[in-house]
Image: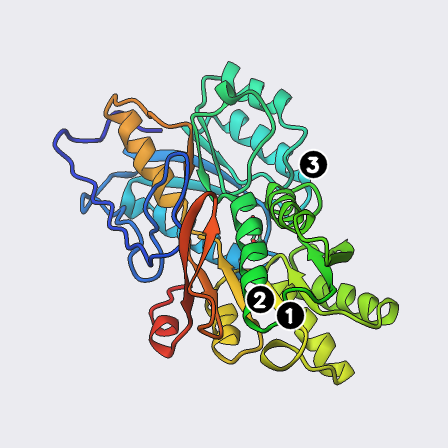
């Protein structure tokens, strides 16, 4: 437990780099991407009695993105930074995650942080946290409950990511002289019922509905994993003879899909089926650089530092002004034929991946 350890005048420096590109939206916070993670180290030595206790119920360990998010949370909520972290990997099991939050309430932690596996089922436990007087933060995926039950949310606009993928595909096909061709699209979706899946599907579907010549063949759950992506791609290859585009809702699924295509001897990327992905982690961007993935839409895993910053503000007696906080994100491609796209009502640059861009990637 803590006892007001924060000294007045303490300065928290939030270093952020904007890679450019997709800007946002309601309450944008700057992109802490690549090498410029927000500095949460206050430089002060805390004795263990004065640590802020935080319970973090993480989704699981299904993807590279997730591992980067976990590492960021561990670094951010470290003792060195004045925190005592109780961490639970919920292994993509929504019931286990809710139990973890109940455990944090029993432990009487100072703050709870949740990255919700799915959007639903949260109201009772959120009310229990409120009744216990424990402030809750939500990061990454969204939660479907009364907004008064959490202090703030920090994460990505998944619908905008999905729309951006549609806008890029439209411009890319036009540039290739394929704008009027019939285009068959197969979706490998992320964990069903997660806000990341719901948003990316809705965003891309919304764009598809405006294109009468785009035909959505199928959408199946690849659970945001490499194995899931490979399994679904194999199912699609059995069922559909003519696939023009595969939309993978994260990089791990894209790697699985690529493996299935390679095994089947089917060309993809720069020389075949168009591959779209989300996350843009280091290995994903490396595949974009090689032309295995045609376009990758960034999702930033570094939201924990924003929560730490908000906790310190609360400790200083300051108000947390914005409930919903989107992190800036960029859009990447292999070729340089699409210069910019509309994303959430604004023009956003498409960044063509170079070796230098890859080298700057921190996760
Ligand atoms: O895209 C995926 C992960 O919730 C945005 O979850 C996150 C998603 C991310 O496992 O890789």
At 76% from the left edge and 69% from the top edge, which residue is drawn? 243
Quarter of the picture containing the N terminus is top left
> Residue most toward the right?
239
Q: Nearer the viewer, residue 312 or 296?
A: 296
- Where is residue 339 shown, x and y percent of the image? 42, 65
Q: In the rendered structure, which disc, 3 or 2, sits on the residue that comes first in sequence?
A: 3
At 58% from the left edge and 79% from the top edge, which residue is drawn? 270
Toward which corner of the image does residue 3 lie, by quadrant? top left
Q: Which mark is residue 174?
A: 2
Q: Nearer the viewer, residue 203 or 153?
A: 203
**Few, some or many residues within 10 Å of mark 3 (<14, 14–19, 20+):** few
Image side of residue 277 versus residue 239, left or right = left
| SS state under label 1 | loop
- Find disc 1 in the rendering and name its residue: 178
Q: Nearer the viewer, residue 2 or 300?
A: 300
**Few, some or many residues within 10 Å of mark 2 (<14, 14–19, 20+):** some
- Find disc 3 in the rendering and name its residue: 95
Q: Nearer the viewer, residue 303 or 206?
A: 206
Q: In the rendered structure, which disc, 1 or 3, sits on the residue that comes first in sequence?
A: 3
Distance in Å between CA atoms under marks 2 and 1 = 6 Å
Answer yes or no: is residue 259 visible. yes
Image side of residue 140 versus residue 263, left or right = left
Quarter of the picture containing the C terminus is bottom left
Marks 2 and 1 close (CB-CB < 8 Å): yes
- Where is residue 164 shown, x and y percent of the image? 52, 53
- Where is residue 125 shown, x and y percent of the image? 60, 24
Say if 12 sits above or below 223 in the image. Answer: above
> Residue most toward the left?
9
């Amino acid at each position: 437990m803590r006892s007001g350890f924060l000294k007045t005048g303490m300065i928290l420096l939030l270093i952020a780099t904007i890679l450019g590109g997709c800007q946002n939206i309601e309450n944008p916070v700057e992109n802490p991407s690549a090498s410029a993670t927000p500095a949460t180290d206050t430089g002060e030595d805390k004795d263990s009695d004065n640590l802020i206790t935080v319970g973090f119920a993480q989704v699981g360990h299904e993807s590279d993105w997730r591992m980067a998010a976990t590492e960021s949370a561990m670094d951010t909520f470290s003792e060195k930074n004045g925190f005592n972290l109780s961490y639970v990997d919920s292994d993509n099991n929504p019931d286990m995650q809710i139990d973890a939050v109940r455990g944090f309430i029993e432990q009487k932690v100072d703050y709870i942080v949740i990255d919700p596996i799915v959007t639903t089922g949260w109201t009772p436990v959120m009310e229990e946290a409120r009744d216990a007087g424990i402030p809750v933060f939500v990061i990454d995926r969204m939660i479907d409950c009364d907004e008064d039950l959490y202090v703030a949310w920090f994460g990505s606009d998944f619908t905008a990511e999905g729309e951006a993928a549609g806008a890029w595909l439209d411009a890319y096909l036009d540039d290739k002289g394929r704008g009027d061709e019939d285009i068959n699209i197969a979706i490998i979706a992320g964990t069903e019922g997660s806000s990341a899946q719901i948003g990316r599907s809705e965003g891309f579907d919304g764009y598809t509905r405006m294109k009468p010549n785009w035909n959505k063949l199928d959408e199946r759950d690849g659970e945001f994993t490499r194995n899931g992506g490979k399994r679904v791609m194999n199912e699609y290859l059995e069922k559909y003879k003519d696939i023009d585009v595969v939309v993978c809702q994260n990089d791990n699924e894209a790697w699985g899909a690529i493996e299935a295509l390679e095994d089947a001897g089917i060309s993809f990327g720069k020389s075949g089926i168009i591959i779209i992905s989300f996350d843009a982690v280091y290995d994903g961007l490396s595949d974009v650089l090689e032309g295995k993935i045609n376009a990758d839409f960034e999702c930033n895993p570094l939201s924990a530092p924003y929560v730490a910053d908000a906790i310190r503000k609360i400790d200083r007696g300051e108000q947390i002004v914005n409930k919903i906080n989107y992190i800036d994100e960029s859009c990447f491609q292999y070729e340089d034929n699409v210069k910019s796209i509309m994303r959430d009502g604004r023009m956003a640059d498409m960044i063509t991946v170079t070796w230098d861009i890859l080298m700057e990637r921190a996760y």
